[in-house]
Amino acid sequence: MRVLRGLLGAVLWLLAAVVGLVGVVLCVTVILLPLGIPVLMLARRLFALAVRLMLPRAVVHPVDELKKTTGRRGKRAASAVDSGVAAVAKRGRKASGKTAGKASGLMHSGKKKVRRTRRRLG
């Protein structure tokens, strides 16, 4: 795909050069000056398009690439946080489940474990 884009950019570059040359010839002729100026503007746009085709996407669209890479990293970070929260919740359920059948005095030690775990992780 990159080779095809480069080849298309090179062909477009040559076309822009020919159109620019025609525009310069039209501008030299004073009578055809109103036609030469728009032709030169067209050549400039063709040159710009040819350069954009030859350059990599990260150079042509830096903001879009930044959004794409930060979006991926953000999703990875969110999934890591979600898995950490799930692990803490699981530990909390286990700790509270262990002391459910015991006397109320022992139940407080399970709550302490949960608090310590939360402090340690959070």
Image: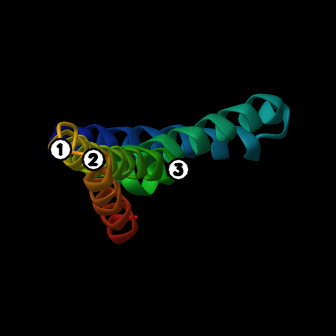
Left or right placement of residue 51 versus residue 87 in this view: right
| Quarter location, residue 23 | top right
Disc 1 marks a residue whose amino acid type is Lys
* Residue found 45% across the figure and 53% down from its top: 66
Left or right placement of residue 114 versus residue 1 in this view: right
Give yes or no for contact between labels 2 and 1 (Cβ–Cβ under 8 Å).
yes
Q: Position of residue 94 (x, y in %)?
A: 17, 44
Tell me, for residue 34, which label it has, or none.
Answer: none
The residue under label 1 is 94
* Residue found 29% across the figure and 50% down from its top: 107
Left or right placement of residue 101 versus residue 47 in this view: left
* Residue found 28% across the figure and 37% down from its top: 8
Numbered label tally: 3
Disc 3 marks a residue whose amino acid type is Val
Q: Say if residue 56 shows up in the picture.
A: no
| Quarter location, residue 42 | top right
Tell me, for residue 92, which label it has, or none.
Answer: 2
Q: Neighbour class for label 1 at 10 Å: few (<14), some, many (≥20)?
A: few
**Nearer the N terminus, badge 1 or badge 3?**
3
Q: Of circles 1 and 3, which is in front?
A: 1
Tell me, for residue 63, which label it has, or none.
Answer: 3
